[in-house]
Amino acid sequence: MPEPSAPSFFRRFRLENPDAARREVEFLAEQVEDARYERDKRAELALRIRLGFLLTPLDREAEAIEALTLALALARATNAWTSEMEALLHLATAYQYRGHRDRAQEFFREGLKRCADWGTKDFDDLFYHHQGRCFVEQGRLDDARRAFENALRLREKTGDARRIASTSAALAELGRL
């Protein structure tokens, strides 16, 4: 159930070709079942993460949450830390778009903690950026600004122009709110 009086989405992610994504979702669902039958946990994990990633922007968040919750458990059971980080990020986003922003924030914080614990900088910027969008939707604009500034600082270090532009645009739009 969505949180009461949840605000609209801030820069919600959408796919460029939703029809192709729907076709891929159908294919992935079959592949997940095949991987389960074959007891190929690594394949199942990768497929569930991709499936959850695609379902969320198709407004099928409940299905995404189911797929990603199972993916997170598989990632932890197989010590696949990169997959765990992806599952946490996509699970947080699915909860956010489902309207459960407090629950989403729990996953964003967990992802950032895992980044710190593991000493990795591979995902921090993603967690901060997505957390910032969720903060905006919660009306927590100061927290949003800090999250976006953290994401931008990290992205400027990597030089990823697309991600830098995305966070810069989010900060600019936040400034107009």
Image (spheres, grey):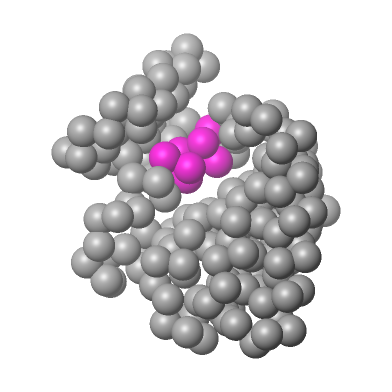
Q: Residue furthest right?
A: 1
Can you give x and y, in whole percent of width and height, for residue 44 in the image? 62, 73
Can you give x and y, in whole percent of width and height, for residue 149 in the image? 30, 34
34 sits to left or right of 53: right
Q: How many marks?
A: 0
On screen, residue 75 above or below 176: below
Can you give x and y, in whole percent of width and height, for residue 83 in the image? 46, 67
On screen, residue 75 above or below 171: below
The answer to whether residue 22 of the structure is visible from this angle is yes
Can you give x and y, in whole percent of width and height, for residue 168 in the image? 35, 23
On screen, residue 140 above or below 162: below
Which residue is at 21% across, 33% downward? 159
Main SS class of the magenta portion in the image: helix
Which residue is at 65% across, 70% downward? 69
131 sits to left or right of 11: left
Which stretch appears magenta?
Answer: 129-136
The answer to whether residue 102 of the structure is visible from this angle is no
Q: Quadrant of residue 121?
A: bottom left
Asked whether 66 falls inside the magenta stretch, the response is no
Q: Quadrant of residue 154?
A: top left
Q: Which is nearer the eye, 3 or 48?
A: 48
Which residue is at 71% across, 70% downward? 32
87 sits to left or right of 100: left
Which residue is at 41% across, 26% downward? 166
Q: Residue furthest top?
A: 176
Q: Residue furthest left?
A: 157
